[in-house]
Amino acid sequence: MSVLIHNVLIPDGGSTTSASVHLKGDRIHQVYFASASIPVSDDTWIDGRDKLLLPGFVNAHTHSSQVWQRGLIPQLPLELWLADVFDSTPTNLEQFYLGAVSTAVDTLLSGGTCLIDHAYVVPGQELETVAALVKGYKQVGIRAFIAPLIQDLPFVAGLPKGCTLPHHPYPRSTTDILSLMEAIIKQFHDPDSGIYIALGPTGFHRCSDELLVGCADLGNRFNLCFHTHLLETRAQQQLAQERYGETAVQHLQRLGVLGDRTTLAHSVWLTADDIAILAQTGATVVHNPVSNLRLGSGIAPILKCLQAGVNVAFGCDGAASNDAQSLLEVVKLSTILHTITDPDYQHWLSPHTVLQMAAQNGARGVGLEQLGMISSGNIADVVLYNLAHPSLLPCNDPLQLLVLGRPTDVVERVWVNGKLIVEEGSVKTVDVAALHQELRDRTRYAQSHQSLLLNQIETHYRQMLL
Amino acid sequence: MSVLIHNVLIPDGGSTTSASVHLKGDRIHQVYFASASIPVSDDTWIDGRDKLLLPGFVNAHTHSSQVWQRGLIPQLPLELWLADVFDSTPTNLEQFYLGAVSTAVDTLLSGGTCLIDHAYVVPGQELETVAALVKGYKQVGIRAFIAPLIQDLPFVAGLPKGCTLPHHPYPRSTTDILSLMEAIIKQFHDPDSGIYIALGPTGFHRCSDELLVGCADLGNRFNLCFHTHLLETRAQQQLAQERYGETAVQHLQRLGVLGDRTTLAHSVWLTADDIAILAQTGATVVHNPVSNLRLGSGIAPILKCLQAGVNVAFGCDGAASNDAQSLLEVVKLSTILHTITDPDYQHWLSPHTVLQMAAQNGARGVGLEQLGMISSGNIADVVLYNLAHPSLLPCNDPLQLLVLGRPTDVVERVWVNGKLIVEEGSVKTVDVAALHQELRDRTRYAQSHQSLLLNQIETHYRQMLL
């Protein structure tokens, strides 16, 4: 593969500049700026006029199987919403495969080239579930981190004090869960083919210290990422104080599980001390603004995190809490939302900054430093946008239009690891029409329902948390 | 025109039901529910399977000429942003015509059938500007309220105390402005052809009491709507106290300008007393959440307004502060944003509620009670959505998918006043490709600039308001 994208706009400081970009093998071989002469060759030549080339974004938190729950679960706070989600999670492996394909397609067509799937796995069929996800991601050709959701405490343990529901012990032992993760790592972790297994304890609120430390140890042994939910809700903040007598971040630091390969989804309820710890340990905060508003979780202190030097990346979160799966929507909302947390506009996020966070900070979060920038020698995970699309007119500032507008169908081509995955706006590695047919055939305007578990915990929730 | 839309989903309580809807002339002639037998006739017959029919939304606040400033103005608070907007407002009448066409197209393709254009008018060419807008809206066939932006105080008067910039008097007298408005009304107000002139004093902050009362009097004489900006920023709240010694809402009520044909854009900085006054007078709050976040104006107290019985509708606001012009984006953000203002999820907005607000409350705001519901005898301003579109898959709750997803290209047909305006997803009354070509040809990746006026007031702004 050798392609020359001629005279295309690329980011340059807070603005854009015209350059010609040579992709060769799995790399951005060379970036030629205006004055440079481009050696003649027999490369495929792409006219870059009215186009913008950006490094691929990282969708640093999603749950692929929730594709089936898009438009299904009512607006509820996390603790109640989750009860509803558990009740309607698919159990059919084919649905997991299709969920992975759908999530990959949505990520690619909204500017992403890499994702972290904090993946539900069917109990008793964990290896088979991961195999189904791997099959989907490999077929599409996206770079995928799969972090199976594991826990060793029951649902009710994740609620603060006062819940009168019985605490049934979790059906699987911590040792068994860690052995299972080791088997998954050995069977599926395969960076050369773009598949990475990560450790994904669901969150401190439903994990013992033993499980969290065990995951960190596995991560260190196999050189893997550690991905977890952190302080998504006020209830979790309260629970940490009750259980540990300190904040969740202080506790995780004490356990030694925070490091520069750690990605922490949400991180809404952080103290100033927590933020300092995250900066010091090099951990990454994954901001999921759509999901946080949808579930009423609050506004993560993203401006304060950035000011303190914390690495902040973006995620869509699963389709049950973000019924769209558009990274472009996530970067827009992130850009406009945080104005209300700080009146000084000089601290607000610019389109340039959020694009950098989406690509470079995301790549840093998963330890792939050679991604996230259009520069010679980097890995070719890049996205070509069509600036002539009506949703990006008139032709004003391209970065601002992309971030602050509502671009649709603007992703024209995507290369992952130098391989062309999207062409003329369509994913060409899988049969997308067949995927859509499956999504239709397996559902039929189901109305949202109230789950039994939800009914059980609602009274408690209202007494304790409102 | 006589059309039968057979077995289509329509809203029914918080859910949907299947019905057949007969459009005839300018009316929804009859709605036949499942059990009813439909008389045989030679109507055009549309298969409603996998489709949803909703009343058209009202885009109750926008500024059409700002289409040219989409993706141009950086993220700044209103007072500074406005200086930049003034400096780059178009002055060419053709651009105003094209701006109206573009705004109408964007409104239609995101579910709207009616808009309020709080319209910039070229000084000295006011009648000609309105003529250009009227031409655009009539060609497209959308229902349009044109409220020319008028003021009789200078820009600097709209800032709170302490500004050291000179207060040049406004170049036109209040009497002259009111005479001009009367001329515009007499020449252009024409409800039968879907064109309504409204009174549009820019906001109390740049209008004398004389102008505000004069507008209300004209409104009463000619039976017109009154549309104005209200308390968009904290600075305006401060200014009202300085100038009147009471809140802006108390002052407007004292002037007698609030009534059930009054639409108040933004209304972010309301007190509890203000909200009670708005409920009592029957005035409508127009919520513009995208613009409010983009400019850091804050979060309007929408849940409190609704609880107090205030009529709340939605607006996109102009493209300089909402670089998209999608009503579907506005209803989504409204649905998820207000969770952070109230922890009790039983107060949160549901998809059903926001759709009702977008259509019925909008229609009520402009005094058109026969719009906003799919029911026999109502005026046929209706929108047919394609639920089979990939962005609305899988087939779960259609209202939730439409509101909480990120639907694109889902508006299939639109009728305004019974006339088919959009077919197969395209506006068929104007040459949209030619519009896009104009938007491209007249702009060329202009970088955003800093205006002279902005530089003049920035020091003052930082001293007074941060």
Image (cartoon, coloured by chain):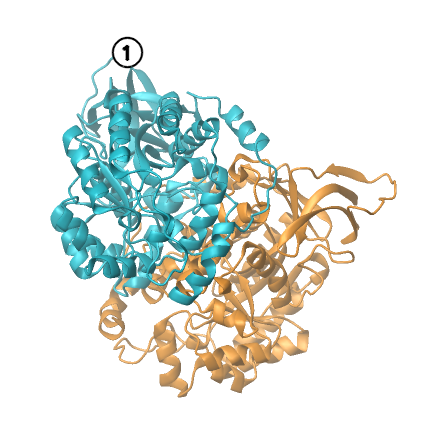
Chain colours: A cyan, B orange
Between A443 and B260, the one nearer to me in the picture = A443
Judge whether B368 appears above or below A394 on screen.
below
> Which quarter of the picture shows residue B155?
bottom left
> Which quarter of the picture shows residue B459?
bottom left
Judged from this view, the residue extending furthest toward the left is A280
> Which quarter of the picture shows residue B284?
bottom right
**Is B290 on the left or on the right of A196, as rendered?**
right
Residue at the (77%, 54%) spot, across then down = B27
Between B115 and B184, the one nearer to me in the picture = B115
- The answer, for residue B416, to whether it is visible in the render is yes
- The answer, for residue B120, to whether it is visible in the render is no
Residue at the (18%, 45%) spot, across then down = A283
Question: Which of the image's four quarters has the C terminus of chain B?
Answer: bottom left
Residue at the (35%, 23%) spot, across then down = A141
Question: Which of the image's four quarters has the N terminus of chain B?
Answer: top right
Between B52 and A65, the one nearer to me in the picture = A65
Q: Which residue is mark 1?
A: A42
Judged from this view, the residue extending furthest toward the right is B40
- Count of residue discs: 1
Q: Position of residue A230 (x, y in %)?
A: 27, 50
Q: Position of residue B130 (x, y in %)?
A: 57, 60
Q: Position of residue A330 (x, y in %)?
A: 37, 46
User: Disc 1 marks which amino acid?
Assistant: Asp
Residue at the (49%, 62%) spot, across then down = B348
Judged from this view, the residue extending furthest toward the top is A42
Query: Label 1: how many residues lie within 10 Å, few (<14), some (14-19) or many (20+)?
Result: few
Q: Position of residue A348 (x, y in %)?
A: 27, 57
Judge whether A265 appears above or below A414 on screen.
below
**Is A139 on the left or on the right of B219, as rendered?**
left
Badge 1 element: loop
Chain letter for mark 1, please. A
